[in-house]
Image: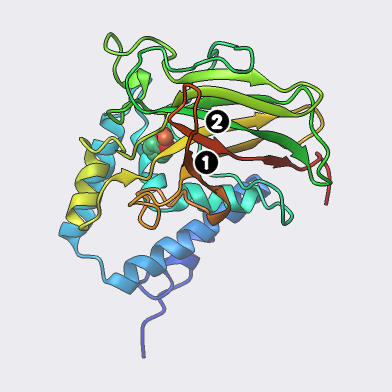
């Protein structure tokens, strides 16, 4: 018979229960619930794989390097959460929406506050290059009514797959970024470039892990949007370029079928491509 150990002493079999029994009566109830579950799952995982001492040391080394590479602009832990699918799972749990509403996806590390506010029709590409594209559509409520005064905060990479903040001094600040506000008809339209697929930052421990797992670091081409309007839930999302080679293997699992947008060859005018996409917002407080 397996030794269950004396109450209060640590044993392999009763390990999680022993640790969780130490949580005191004064602990915050939610913290106690979350930490007890974490300990249960962590201990079950260690038992499941029979973690070796060397593997435990590797894990500690990996987490240490992950922390050491973080600074004001680089957040390797969020990247780790992204490639493990954890970011998308938290997002899914916290942004359940009715059918027909625009779905969320991962924010990513390249959003910046304070992008220029433009009139509709402006060009967010400040550097030229790339394939010209007109982005247009409507912001609607679930009944199909236009939402006036909605802001669309948009950003994407350049033709080489880099955001402006990754190339200071190479790209102009706020290249391929802008904020637009809808009028009474809920319509938006702006010019930019057709985004391209790119690798997530893979020169750190997370990139190394992907390599060791035989996973590539690429994201399918996408345009980021944060769509916000008074009285509505804010949508943090992207539109993905249809038929991109990485749609089914996004390194951070951000693709949802409903977010895939057609990019069609534009006829006449200055744009080479046109991508039309409507955003449908849910009223705050709706069930
Ligand atoms: C992005 O789409 O910008 C992104 C998202 C997650 C990780 C890295 C980049
Ligand atoms: Fe992105």
Give the crowd class for mark 1: few <14, some 14-19, many >=20 residues within 10 Å: many
**Which mark, residue 150?**
none
Asked if the residue at label 1 sits under 8 Å from ligand 2, the reply is: no
Residue 37, how many percent across, how many down? Answer: 53, 60
Q: Is residue 70 left or right of residue 189?
A: left
- Quadrant where the N terminus sits is bottom left
Judging by the rendered image, the residue that carries numbered circle 2 is 135
**Secondary structure state at the residue bearing disc 2:** strand
The structure residue drawn at horizontal position 31% and vertical position 38%, both measured from the top left corner, is 200
Q: Position of residue 28 (x, y in %)?
A: 65, 44
> Is 161 displayed left or right of 43 in the figure?
left
Q: Quadrant of residue 136?
A: top right
Give whichever of 197, 18 is nearer the camera.
197
Q: Are marks 2 and 1 in contact (CB under 8 Å)?
A: yes
Residue drawn at the location 79% of the way across and 25% of the way down:
148
Q: Nearer the viewer, mark 2 or mark 1?
A: 2
Check disc 1 and report the residue beneath it: 239
CA gap, disc 2 and disc 1: 10 Å
Residue sitting at 39 percent across and 40 percent down?
Answer: 221
Q: Residue at x 48, y 46 (%)?
A: 87
First in sequence: mark 2 vs mark 1? 2
Q: For ligand 1, which image quadrant applies?
A: top left
User: Furthest residue to the front?
Assistant: 268
Badge 1 element: strand
Q: Nearer the viewer, residue 101 or 124?
A: 124
Dividing the picture into quarters, in which one does residue 147 lie? Answer: top right
Q: Position of residue 227 (x, y in %)?
A: 65, 31
């Amino acid at each position: 018979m397996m030794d269950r150990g004396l109450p209060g002493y640590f044993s392999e079999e009763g390990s999680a229960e022993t640790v969780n029994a130490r949580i005191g009566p004064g602990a915050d109830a939610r913290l106690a619930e979350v930490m007890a579950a974490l300990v249960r799952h962590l201990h079950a995982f260690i038992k499941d794989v029979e973690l070796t001492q060397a593997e435990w040391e590797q894990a500690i080394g990996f987490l240490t390097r992950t922390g050491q590479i973080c600074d004001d602009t680089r957040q390797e832990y969020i990247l780790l959460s992204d490639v493990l699918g954890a970011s998308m799972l938290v997002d899914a749990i916290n942004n359940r929406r009715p059918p027909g509403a625009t779905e969320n996806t991962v924010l990513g590390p390249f959003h910046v506050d304070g992008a220029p506010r433009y009139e509709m029709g402006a060009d967010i590409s400040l550097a030229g290059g790339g394939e010209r594209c007109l982005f247009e559509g409507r912001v609607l409520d679930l009944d199909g009514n236009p939402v006036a005064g909605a802001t669309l905060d948009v950003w994407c990479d350049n033709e080489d797959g880099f955001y402006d903040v990754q190339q200071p001094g190479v790209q102009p600040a706020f290249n391929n970024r802008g904020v637009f506000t809808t009028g009474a008809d809920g319509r938006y339209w702006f010019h930019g470039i057709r985004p391209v697929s790119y690798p997530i930052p893979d020169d750190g421990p997370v990139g190394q892990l992907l390599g060791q797992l035989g996973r590539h670091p690429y994201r399918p081409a996408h345009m980021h949007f944060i769509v916000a309007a008074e009285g509505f839930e804010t949508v943090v999302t992207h539109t993905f370029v249809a038929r991109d080679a990485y749609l089914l293997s996004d390194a951070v699992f951000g693709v949802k079928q409903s977010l895939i947008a057609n990019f069609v060859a534009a006829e006449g005018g200055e744009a080479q491509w046109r991508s039309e996409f409507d955003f449908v917002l849910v009223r705050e407080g709706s069930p």
